[in-house]
Amino acid sequence: MQYKKLGNSELRVSTIALGTWGLGGGSVWSDRDSTAAEAARLLDACKEQGINYIDTAPVYGTGASEELLGAALAGRRHDFILQTKCSLNWRGEGGNFHYSRDGYTVNNDTRPEAIRRDVEDSLRRMKTDYLDSVIVHYVCKSFPVAETVGALEELIRQGKIRAYGLSNSQPTDLNEYQSAPEKKQGVSVVQEFFSILSPFHGRDYFPVCEKYNTTFQTYGVLEEGFLTGPAFLERKFAKTDIRSRIPWVEEQYHDGLRRAFEAWTPLCREKNCSFAQLVEAWALAQHPNMSLLVGMRKPENVADTVRCLTLSLSPAELAAMEETVKPIQVKVLDK
Ligand SMILES: NC(=O)c1ccc[n+]([C@@H]2O[C@H](COP(=O)([O-])OP(=O)(O)OC[C@H]3O[C@@H](n4cnc5c(N)ncnc54)[C@H](OP(=O)(O)O)[C@@H]3O)[C@@H](O)[C@H]2O)c1
């Protein structure tokens, strides 16, 4: 495993991070609900492979992902760098309407009191007294950024969190957070969608991350499974499932995706790797300070994923890989 500092923080994180949106199950990852024993086995696999960086969020399964992690972390909390999120809550205390699902109304609220309550709720659900990193899940223009920064910096001073970050944001948001008078440690990580099918947002972001020494963390590098191989295109998902709501579920993209898998097959044979490992290695090659966040519920996928770190792709191979998907690349993904 490779390890890097997370932005300007003192945290030393594995280059591959475990994403646990799927662990939350429910109507959004509707094919399976995970158990506490499965969550524990997932962390065992991470430990075995050297993955110490775990990402979750209050809204993943409306508390379920955090609670499963809390149980799985018992007795080994200090072995992991635990990252969760703030701003999206279902407490009904105001903020902007974000979505309604499964009987819960989720609002986006980046005001200081909401951030503090989010952190307390996450600490309780995960049975811990500190969070390593907390990411503003959806940056929000309605409330003053300086106050949000003030609240996050205060949580660092209190020892409740060690670093903070932004998500679903723009490079201008990072500039604004970094320019707030309350900023001390600043933004350590931005977590943004990035894959070979949607690389533009990341590319706009990379120079701004470099300017502030902020880690760029990908999400959706496998496009929720659609980049794992042609068999995935045959799968059917419930209407509420995230995988029924991203572009790749539509027939119009399937020919393009099948052509890409066909074009990548000789490279996979030559490198003795899977499509998943190939597109992960492609992503890692795009930016030097990248954290590769991969959603995994199956322990065997953890061992499989880490092999992407051993692949070496030449500039010509990287360019050729992207060339095949250029006709179907999309600019914006909102998950
Ligand atoms: N900030 C945000 O708004 C935001 C949005 C989306 C995601 N995220 C975070 O980013 C993480 C990653 O994104 P994601 O989970 O949506 O999508 P993803 O990482 O693109 O894809 C996850 C899917 O790929 C499968 N997979 C993983 N490794 C595999 C392997 N080696 N072989 C075959 N299949 C493999 C997983 O299967 P199994 O589940 O069956 O193991 C899962 O179904 C999330 O879990 C979450 O922590 C953040």
Image (cartoon, helix red, strand yellow):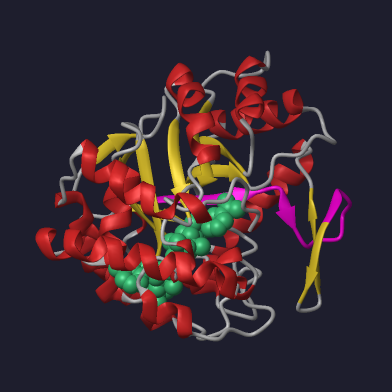
Q: Is-magenta flag for residue 95?
A: yes
Residue 264, image x, y percentages? 27, 61
Q: Vertically, is 139 above or below 294? A: above
Give the left or right position of residue 244, taking residue 74 as reference.
Answer: right
Residue 308, image x, y percentages? 22, 55
Question: Toward which corner of the image does residue 175 lie, by quadrant?
Answer: top right
Q: Vertically, is 137 above or below 35? A: above
Residue 217, image x, y percentages? 44, 43
Q: Residue at x 47, y 70 (%)?
A: 255
Residue 118, image x, y percentages? 68, 51
Residue span colored magenta = 81-97
Give the left or right position of residue 139, taking residue 286 as reference.
Answer: right
Give the left or right position of residue 129, taking residue 301 as reference.
Answer: right
Give the left or right position of residue 111, taking residue 282 as reference.
Answer: right
Q: Vertically, is 289 above or below 109? A: above
Q: Residue at x 27, y 50 (%)?
A: 281
Q: Is-magenta flag for residue 125?
A: no
